[in-house]
Amino acid sequence: MTRICVTDAIPEPSIARLRASGHEVIVHDGPQPPDRAELLTLVEGADAVLTVLSDRVDAEFLEAAGPRLKVVANIAAGHDNIDLAACAARGVVATNTPGVLFDATADLAFGLLLAVTRRLGEGERLIRAGRPWRYRTTFLLGHSIEGKTIGLIGAGQIGTAMARRCRAFRMSIAYAAEHPMREPARTELDAVGMPLDELVASCDVISLHCPLTEGTRHILDAGRIATMRPGAYVINTARGACIDEHALAQALASGRLAGAALDVYENEPEIDPALLGLENVVLAPHLGSANVETRTAMCDLAAENALAVLAGRPAPNALRP
Ligand code: GLV
Ligand code: GLV
C-alpha cells in the first residue's frame, strides 16, 4: 500500500480526500510540530509527504524517507524550506500551493499597514495594561496612508493583491520586481516599476512580497534601510530573512523609521529581543494565509499535487530547480 505522510494536522476533509484514494495516510498529530528526529522517523518509507514551511526538506530528509518517495507537496506558496536540487537529484517532485493564498496574505499585509500607521498595537497594549487614557485631540496620533506611496518589493500575485488594496485607499503604487507587474493590474493601478534602490529611498512604506532566495536574502539590509525616508514604514509578510532584522530594529529604535509591522522573522519563531521592546512595531505570528477558507484550499491543493504524482500524472504545481 502506498503511504502518504502529513507532517502537521490539516483539516479533516483534506485528509479524507487523501484516504479516499486508497492510500495509507499518516498524520502527525502531536500538540507540537515534530522535531527533526520525529520528522525523519515520520517520513520513513513514505511515497508522498505533505510538508509545511518549518520542515527542512534536504538530502537528509530525502535519505530518511527512502527510495519510495515520489513527491513532496509543500502546503505553502513559499518553498525556501525545500532543496529543489536535492529533490531533482533523487527524482522526487516538489510542489507548492500558488494561486490560493494571495488575497489572504494581502489582507493581512494591508491590516498590518493600518495597524502600524494607526498605532493599534500601542493602543491595545495600553488598554490591556490598565493604563489610564482619555480621548484627547493629540492622543496616540498615527499617520494617514492616503496620498502616500507604497513601495512593493515583488509584484507577483500577492504584491499585486496588496497594490489593489492600497490603491482603494488612494495610495500611489510603486514596485521593484524581476518582472513587470502583470496587466491589466499594472495599468489599472497606475503601478510604477523602478529600480530597487530608488524604490527603497523614495517610498513612504516598503512592503515585501518576494520569495526568499539567495538573491533576496537581506534584500532590505542595513545599507538600504539607511537610505529609507525618515518616518517611513516597513511591512513584511514574505520571509523574515528578506530583512536584516537587527538593522531594522536599530532604525526603529532610533526613531528614524516610524514603524514596522512584521508577520515573519529571521529565526522564526525566535524574535530579535531588540524588536520586542519597541512600541512602534506590530508583531504577528506568521498568519499571512491563516484563515479557514485559505488553509483548506492550500491543503486540498497540496493533496491534489501529491495524488497526481502517485497516479503517474504531472503535478499541477511542480517546482523547477
Ligand atoms: C506562507 O508563508 C507560505 O509561503 O505559504
Ligand atoms: C471621534 O470620535 C469623532 O467623533 O470625531
Image (cartoon, rainbow, N blue to C red):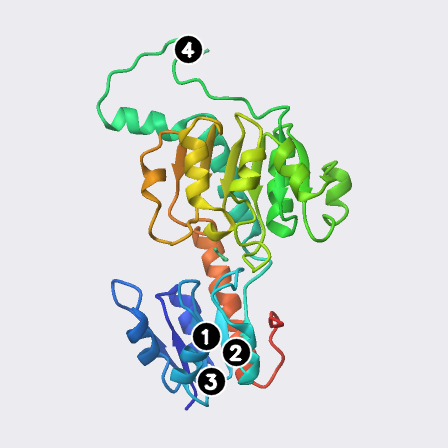
Identity of the amino acid at label 4? Answer: Thr
Q: Tell me the residue that label 1 is attached to.
A: 58
**Residue at the spot 66% in from the left edge and 48% down from the top edge:** 155
Tell me how far mark 3 sits from mark 4, CA to CA. Answer: 62 Å
Of the numbered discs 3 and 4, the one sitting upstream in the chain is 3
Which label's residue is closer to the chain start, 2 or 1? 1
Q: Nearer the viewer, residue 102 or 180?
A: 180
At x 53%, y 45%, the residue is 221
Residue at image mark 4: 138
Q: Residues within 10 Å of mark 1 (few under 14, many from 20)?
A: some
Of marks 3 and 1, which one's residue comes earlier in the chain? 1
> What type is the residue that disc 3 sits on?
Leu
Say which of marks 2 and 3 sits in front.
Answer: 2
Q: Which residue is mark 3?
A: 69
For residue 203, above or below residue 144: below
Q: Which residue is mark 2?
A: 86
Left or right of 116, for residue 277: left
> Height in image: 244 above or below 6?
above
How far apart are the alpha carbons under marks 3 and 1? 13 Å
Q: Dot 2, how many residues are within 10 Å of its Cα: few (below 14), some (14-19), or many (20+)?
A: some
**CA–CA distance in space, label 2 to label 1:** 6 Å
| Mark with earlier residue (2, 3) | 3
Q: Residue at x 40, y 34 (%)?
A: 281
* Tag 2 and tag 3, C-beta contact below 8 Å: no
Disc 3 vs disc 1: Cβ atoms closer than 8 Å?
A: no
Instruction: Please tell me whether mark 4 or mark 2 is closer to you in this view.
Output: 2
- Residue 35 position, x and y percent, is 29, 69
CB under 8 Å between callouts 4 and 1? no
Q: Nearer the viewer, mark 3 or mark 1?
A: 1
